[in-house]
Image (cartoon, rainbow, N blue to C red):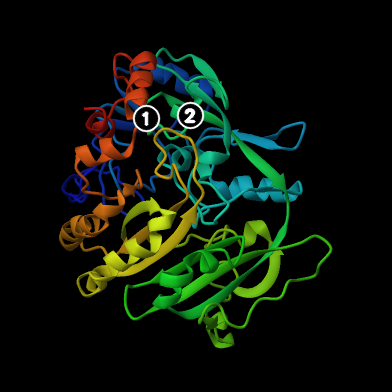
Amino acid sequence: MTTTHETLRPPRRDERNWADSFSYGATRVVQPTTIDELSELVAGAPRIRALGTRHSFSDVADGPGLLVSTTALPADPVISDDGHGVTVGAGTNYAVVAQHLDRHGLALLNMGSLPHISVGGAIATGTHGSGLGLGSLSSAVSALEIVGPDGSLRTVRRGQPGFDGSVVALGALGVVVRVTLDVQPGFRMRQDTYVDLPWSSVDDHLMDVMGAGYSVSFFHEFDHRIREVLVKSRVPDGLADVSMPRDLWGARPAPVEEHAEVTGTKSTPMDGSVGSWADRLPHFRIDATPSVGSELQSEHFVALEDGAAALRAVRRLGDELRPHLHTCETRTVAGDPLWLSPTPQDSLGIAFTWKKHPAEVAALIPRVEEALAPFTPRPHWGKLSALPHAAIVAAYPRLADFADLVREIDPEGKFGGPAVERLLA
């Protein structure tokens, strides 16, 4: 797992991540436009790693040789004959996928907060949205097309040997070029905002709060109350709308003037209006760039049953955290069987969006991880962490199986990089 002192170093090269907080150590970055071109690059390179939309804050995508971006590969979305899946280019962002499916009356099971991340990068790192019954974005994968060390293309499908080790794989098994995702019939939804949720409601009614809609998340700065709760609710076919409670375990609907402030901004509508799932499931609008990336991020997952206690433990650090914190978003993720999934069981995700204070954040992340230690936290692979290697090994019982799979597929370590090599050390 990556460490904060390695990933918060000052930029030193032209190739940097989205937040301009990490500079890649690769010799060069190339952007092929066809799978054949990419395969030729892979076959001829001694060391190579895949790169997506660069939304990771860790060195998970970095490598010592060539970085090959998949974002110029054709999206070429293909809906399956039975309408249960869609296959797309791995470098395609979720906004493109969502718009295509919406036009065809279909929907993704869930989306992350940000629709501009690439499909391949999101699934390789265990990225997620929120919802008690909704798994991570990786859990929706039913097939992968991967370019291997010799440049040849192979397909691995759900149910085949090694599939559960090949989805959240940190790029260690090759360059993923096409991904098949589960889809469902399209639906409408509304997104409502509640404010001032008492912490006592989280302590006593966490499952009720997080189960108030199809997808629920809340934002806070570990002070006296939870600032905002976003409740995304499906509107059943045949109904014009659904009613929402006037009181959500002590939280109240946000005033109309607060909704007016976000109208026309980069956020998706949060005023209870009904619209397409594609315009309500993500937090940010598909047609807008959400921010300038002036932030750092860390995130840890704990078992859902430990969620309230884990939040109480971190709240004790509130006075230390707040001067360096933009916000903390808390979400739920249903468990999945993927070997390197940060959410192997129903989980609570505690996601910090920090101010761009590298030294202070590097000192605070270990403090957060110490507070969460009794709950066996698992960090998001694409975000910052200082957990020691022993803690990572203890949290992933299938890590040895993953190491065996890497040795079988890539015995020469062509797809290795600093993060992968530390993990498998």
SS at badge 2: helix
Q: Quadrant of residue 199?
A: bottom left
Q: Residue 168, located in which quarter of the rendered image?
A: top left
Q: Position of residue 33 (x, y in %)?
A: 51, 30
Report crowding for label 1: few under 14, some 14 to 19, many 20 or more residues within 10 A (C-alpha).
some
**Residue found 62% across the figure and 48% down from its top:** 109
Residue 386 visible in rendering: yes
Gap between marks 1 and 2, in whole Å? Answer: 10 Å
User: CB of mark 1 within 8 Å of CB of mark 2?
Assistant: yes
Measuring from the top left, give residue 271's x and y in whole percent.
Answer: 61, 76
Q: Quadrant of residue 183?
A: top right
Give amino acid for label 2: Asp
Point 60% across, 47% down: residue: 96
Dot 2 alpha-carbon crowd within 10 angstroms: few under 14, some 14 to 19, many 20 or more: many
Task: Provide residue 93's location: percent of width, then percent of height.
Answer: 53, 45
For marks 1 and 2, the one nearer the N-term is 2
In the image, 282 versus 406, the foreground residue is 406
Q: Considering the image in quadrants, where does the C terminus appear?
A: top left
Quarter of the image for the N terminus: give it.
Answer: top left
* Residue at numbered disc 2: 164
Residue 398 marker: 1
Pinpoint residue 410: horizontal percent, then vertical percent: 35, 17
Residue 1 visible to the viewer: no
Mark 1 residue element: loop
Would you place residue 264 above or below residue 300 in this image?
A: below
